[in-house]
Image (cartoon, rainbow, N blue to C red):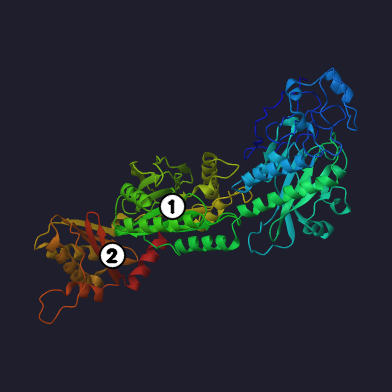
Amino acid sequence: MEPHPRADTNTAPSAQQPGEAAPRTPLSRPSSPGSGRSCAGEVPGSGGSDEVPGGAPEGLRLPGRGAARPAPAAGVPAEQSGDEVGRGSEAEGGRDEAEQGRDPEERLPETQSDRLRFLDLAARRIARGVDLDETLRGLYEAAVPAFADVVLVHLREPLVAGEGQAAEPLVLRLHSFAQGPEGVVTAASAASAGVAGPVRSTVGGPFAELLLGRQPVFGDVPETEAVVSELLEPVAGVSATGAPGRRLIIAPLYGRRHLLGTVALLRAAGRPVFVADDLLVAAQLATYTALGVEASVPSGQEASAADALQLRMLPSSLPETTGVRLASRYLPAAETSQGGGDWYDAIPLPGNRVALVVGDVMGHSMTSAAMMGQLRTTVQTLARLDLPPEEVLYHLDEQARRLGSEHMATCLYAIYDPISQRLLVADAGHPPPVLLHPDGSGEVLQVPPGAPIGVGGVPFETWELPAPTGGTLLLYTDGLVESRNRDVLTGMELLRGRLEAVAARVAPPPLDMLCDAVLTLLDPDARDDDVALLAARFDGFAPLNVAYWFLSPQPQTAGRARQLTRRALHRWGLGSMLDATELMVSEVVTNAVRYASRPIALRLLRTDVLRCEVGDDSPQVPRMRRAQAGDEGGRGLFLVDQLALRWGATLLSTGKVVWFEQEIPEEYRQHRQEGADAA
């Protein structure tokens, strides 16, 4: 077999990508010259990991306590010292030019200054991390292979932060590990990489007491005997070489107040064992790492405040509108993450339409949660103006830039019309919705995404799609379909398949059942983002329950409106409601004729209530007032207020709509329900 080429001295250890299988290579060191990893330029004087037969890696900058000194070049007599392991073979094979040109001071492993320089470099590497993964990556880069061949980090589950109370019993979960076979360091998330065997273990007894003592120990102490094999399970070859003994150091990761986990440092069978001074080095590495881990986890008070802020800004309930049924779910990110910026909303619009909204502010912080609240309020305001979806996103983008926040957001805004059974959708960089058709087939809607909110200068487009009666539309944030071990496209296909599987069992599936089934796609170990989910079942609106007319704004229009209303109520069997309905229609239409310059729209809708809508092109919204005894007008809306179950006026981009609702008699509702049941 050809010797493995020497790694570039400036190459950082590569992290295993999410979803890849964790490496399970035998724990051994390279035996051919030039196969080691050179650390020149990283740890002053740390040397590489070139190995000589029967000896330790050359140039290890820590006091190797038995580590070999660098061998002299070929033809130069070997230095007569106690560290002569493998000297003869090294002299025969010679040294490469890089080793020959190294400063002699870099090859002295015994000085106290070398140990301090190594710890200083390790501290700076670990402190560079801005999150948990980067903090641990700094530990791996510093420790492998200069100090150990394998480093494994187990974290407490759940990971306690700040003033929080630590959970009992103590449960450790393997977060990640790094090892350097053939000089290439690999870090992998063991929890998501399919490592065989348990990744969690409940710790108690002597080992738990040992960890609470805050001091690192060798792997041969009696307290560790029962847990060593489980801690080192991802490392292949340990069982074949027997108990690691003093080739293993276990150091507790202790923060300012709580035990956060453990770090295990293991050397290969061909390297010298650890000695007492190495425990001091391991203790410092564990301290630096623990402080970095603790800093990467938000304090309990801050996280609770962010979560509470976000939950208060989400809708407490969804509206009950005719023609569509709604259900929603929201899941915060992991307990150690701050509140995110995911939100959803359903906003009733004139004409029994409903706006469906889902959005995601990038980041996890108090600022993200506050930004989410501002954007959601802006969307609600714009929606009540009945603007087209592309205009809603345009004004939302303008508002986001005016807020001056560096946070960007994605948003999907859709309007469902149960009467026309059409869907208008505009997308600002958000994952597309998924439609479950009445026949049980799923479809990822091809809605071209625009730029995210906050970018500015990019137009948005509205796409019109069919919304079949009996279909279910699913709007979601990327936390549902994307994780550390799954990309967005794969997640969307899995989501579509899950919807089809649920529909195959129950047709049509209840919305709550559908939402719960979708959430089973989430991997609790790989999920680090919050999830917002909004499901809408299209019930549609039967044409026979709608009466619609356009009337010219003329003096006789009020009489014509009364005649059309009377005809529709007779057709629906609501003759008992004629007098009150005609009076209110006449008053509202008369007010519209007074201000309108274009045809007036009159629409009657029969659902559980009788709804009347009168629209015109005037932006002047009527206000109810109490007329004086001598006034000739001003009593129309007062009558409407007294006779109607509820009424209101909605300002639109093209004018306004004045509407009122009346309760349908109980006997009619019972008769209608019996007919529906029989059908």
Type of amino acid at the residue the image marks with label 1: Val
Q: Secondary structure at mark 1?
A: strand
Residue 380's disc is none
Q: Position of residue 668 (x, y in %)?
A: 33, 69
Q: Nearer the viewer, residue 530 or 667?
A: 530
Q: Position of residue 423 (x, y in %)?
A: 36, 48
Q: What is the distance, in whole Å, between disc 1 and disc 2 at their CAs?
A: 29 Å
Disc 1 designates what residue?
Answer: 358
Among the 4 quarters of the image, the one containing residue 448 = top left
Among the 4 quarters of the image, the one containing residue 315 = bottom left
Type of amino acid at the residue the image marks with label 2: Arg
Task: Judge whether residue 560 can be spotted in this image.
Answer: no
Disc 2 designates what residue?
Answer: 611
In the image, taking residue 501 as reference, residue 378 lies left or right, namely: left
Question: What residue lies at 88% left-to-right and 40% top-to-bottom?
Answer: 242
Task: Judge whether residue 641 can be spotted in this image.
Answer: yes
* Neighbour tally class for label 1: few under 14, some 14-19, many 20 plus, Cα within 10 Å: many
Relative to residue 599, is residue 301 depicted above or below?
below
Q: Position of residue 131 (x, y in %)?
A: 60, 48
